[in-house]
Image (spheres, rainbow, N blue to C red):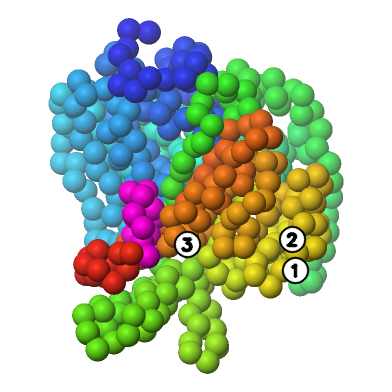
Amino acid sequence: MDYKFKTKPYKHQIDALNKAAHQVEWAYFMDMGTGKTKTTIDNIGILYQQRKINSALVVAPKSVYLNWEQEIKTHLPDDIKRNIHCWNVSKTTKWNPFKEKLVGSCSFLLMNVESLSTKRGVDAAANFLKINQHALFAIDEATTIKNPRAKRTKHILALSTLSKYRRILTGSPVTKSPLDLYTQCAFLNKGLLGYDSYYAFRARYAVMHTIYTNANTQVQIPKYYCNLGELETKLKAFSTRIRKDQCLDIPPKIYKQRYVHLSYEQQKVYDSLRKNALAILEDSTVSYTNKLTEILRLHQLCNGFLKNDDGLITEFKNPKLEELDLIIDEVSGKMIIWANYVKNIEDISSHLLKRFGKGSVVSMYGATDLASRQNAVKFFQNAPECRFFVANPQTGGHGLTLTKAEYVVYYSNNYNLELRWQSEDRAHRIGQTKNVTYIDLIMKDTVDQRIVEALDKKMDISAQTMGEEIKKWLQ
């Protein structure tokens, strides 16, 4: 390829591009942490430099679509001029920055997949594709369109016909069933799997049976799957499959961030608490402990609850728990989930047990006795059915060996930098034979985000808490 990479690719990324870069439709089935975003950006750069495309529409979940702007700036060669527009999820008016095609630069429109359930979002995407005409349309985390009956899936399939090139990206194309593949592949091209109808596809690869629900209605569910070897052969013709354990040259620690947004109810309470906290921080007569309590309440709210002085807990709908489910669906392998609060540990553990069944989860926090802690570690390390280790860093962040984990999710972070480092090393230590991916779940534009930013800067937050830095967070 006559293409000058801005950032050096790994061998598996070069191999993928050599095979896929000039294809009209392609699926990058690449595990989280193997660089499917960079690969796609370089693919866009190659096609743009060869004048095969002039723009790219990238659709991703709300938690990651804004990350693409920085990824484009990081990986797209500087000699490719770019014009990047990010969809604003909060606006309710019509949105159209594209009056005419911009000559001499590659135009990007970054949208969250949820917006394509709305007329406003569909109209903006259609307008972008019609004006630019020669566009690449990419769906990041393509399992978000696996449901053929969903409104956004239908809209996206219709929009795909307006694009010249198409890409789908996901680490786990099959989250529950091989039938998940149909609409993802139909986005690329309806003919790729040989069926114009989901039901014809289902009849080939699944045997269905009828069950009755409590409402006495009939529902068809798969009894078993068949002809999967044939399906796998078809997929290989238009996809790249890369697993993390195949990539010997990627770094041992891989960091990812997933952003979520406060619910409407959380936002109202957060705004009120933030104003009150700022006033208390500026009051010299208020004690250090009371000031710290105000920050703690804001952080609790970001994690789905508030605990008052009497110990009574008010619960809120928690978008972090929904995002955790999405992450789990995208990856395979064992996972550590660190959470700062016992309330979160209990809720996460209960949720995962209901979803994955008995033996799938072990947990640990301050009240866990020594024998139970040792048993939890042993079970996680040795039992195939135990996929999740849920704990707080204060209890489990030191001394434990959890090298069976390939993924570490920070549901919420502690203020202590040393605890962060120590907890990271529970998975990344002698005995670990795979690369470890660390994922921070971050409540955007809150103290939750500021804490992660401070940890990234290696700040000792405990020493900064009552200084000017924390006031900037609240202002």
Q: Where is residue 112? Give x, y as percent.
A: 39, 49
Q: Can you give x and y, in whole percent of width and height, for residue 251 in the image?
A: 50, 29
- Quadrant of the image containing the C terminus: bottom left
Q: Position of residue 418 (x, y in %)?
A: 47, 54
Please tell me which residue lies in front, 354 or 90: 354
Q: Viewer-proximal residue, 410 or 39?
A: 410
Q: Nearer the viewer, residue 339 or 1?
A: 339
Disc 3 versus disc 2: distance between alpha carbons?
20 Å
Q: Is residue 459 visible?
A: yes
User: Mark 1 to mark 2: distance in Å?
Assistant: 6 Å
Residue 369 is marked as 1
Which residue lies at the image location 80% right of the left edge and 44% below the top edge?
A: 382
Q: Which residue is mark 3?
A: 414
Residue marked by disc 2? 373
Q: Which residues are magenta?
A: 448-462
Q: Is residue 158 magenta?
A: no
Residue type at mark 1 is Asp
Q: Is residue 103 left or right of residue 315?
A: left
Element under label 1? loop
Q: Between 345 and 368, which is closer to the camera in this rendering?
A: 368
Answer with left or right where residue 28 lies relative to residue 231.
left
* Residue at x 39%, y 63% (from the top left corner): 448
| Res 263 label | none
